Amino acid sequence: MRYPWGNNRRFHSWTDEIRTRYGTRLQKVSVNAGFGCPNRDGSKGVGGCTFCNNKGFSPSYCDPEKPVGQQIDEGLSFLRRRYPRAGVFVAYLQTYSNTHAPVSKLMQVYEAALAHPAISGLVIGTRPDCVDEEKLNYLAGLAEKHFIHVEYGIESCNDRTLERVNRGHSFADSRRAIFLTAERGILTGAHMIAGLPGESREMMLSHADRINDLPLNSLKLHQLQIVRGTAMAEEYNDHPERFDLFSLEEYIGFVVDFLERLHPGIAIDRFSGEVPPQFILGRRWGNVRSDAVARLIEQCLEEKGAYQGRLYR
């Protein structure tokens, strides 16, 4: 069977979408440019989101004290050994909120990355309350010549949950930022966490219905992981009964059900998250990596005769 996204895979893959658009896979090179977070520096709040510890996913070569070009060189050295067939690279600004600065600072960082001869574009991770029309107009100009993909942390579509984890913005903020970005022709992605405290399975599935109305190109799904050094880890130690963490089998079943409700035009960039074992509290999945989780999800889709968008209306 050939699905609406043009192949016989049972979900719309962002990797396949990129290959179709650009004729190759784009490999991300992480960069820490020293941007902060409005939920930490007092402009929106302090302490950050209760689940957040950036040390849990930042590569060792990402050091904001190093120039952007040096970080890219070190990242390329690592990635070319790991992915010898990779030929096209983009700089991935992932740590904290990478539009949380005046446009002059964005220009300095982004254009330093784009000046590197091996870099063809940018993937910019940020919060929906850290963009405005001036910043987006600047990004739209870059997108006329380069690959530009903005990823927003939505995390949940439920405002009570967002308040519960000290997120510092509402779902309405996410909607506004995504529409403003997409209407400028900029590739627009979102990040969601499944399993945040207080959310039932049905509530999590209903998030698919709400994001179906958004002009998203891509979506990353992550299971909740309790990371050491966070406020959530302290809460988990004191009140583990407040958390219902997914087993691997439960998560696979949830993602399959979520995909069936998801708009077929939204491509999946990632199915699960990885944090080094030394950072994790609570339920673990052993040595199962993200690529293995993706294969298990595809296997489950096949076994159930399920596919992305089957229940979308």
Image (spheres, grey):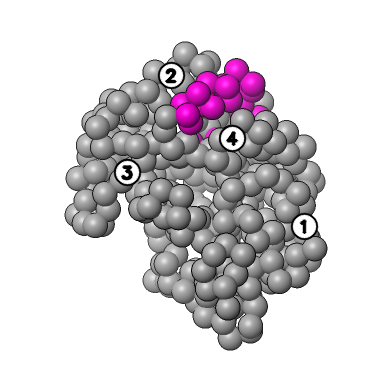
The image position of residue 129, as x and y in percent, is 66, 30
Q: Is residue 205 among what the camera can see?
A: yes
Indicate the amino acid at tag 3: Phe
Foreground residue, 125 or 310? 310
Pointer 4 residue: 185
Pointer 2 residue: 107
| Separation of residues labelled 1 and 4 (CA atoms) | 23 Å
Numbered disc 1: secondary structure? helix
The image position of residue 21, as x and y in percent, is 46, 50
Sooner in the amino-acid sequence: mark 2 or mark 1: 2
> Going 24% across and 57% down the picture, which residue do you hit?
85
> Which quarter of the image is occupied by the N terminus?
bottom right
Pointer 1 residue: 209
> Going 42% across and 67% down the picture, which residue do you hit?
291
> Going 40% across and 26% down the picture, which residue do you hit?
110
Q: Which mark is residue 89?
A: 3
Numbered disc 4: secondary structure? loop
Camera-nearest label, 1 or 4: 4
Q: Is residue 255 among what the camera can see?
A: no
Indicate the amino acid at tag 1: Asp
| Separation of residues labelled 3 and 4 (CA atoms) | 21 Å
Magenta stretch: dominant SS? Answer: helix
For label 2, the crowd category at 10 Å Cα-Cα, with few meaning under 14, some 14 to 19 and many 20 or more, is some
Sooner in the amino-acid sequence: mark 2 or mark 3: 3
Left or right of 119 in this view: 173:
right
* Residue range (magenta): 124-144
Are discs 1 and 4 less than 8 Å apart at CB? no
Numbered disc 3: secondary structure? strand
Foreground residue, 227 or 240? 227
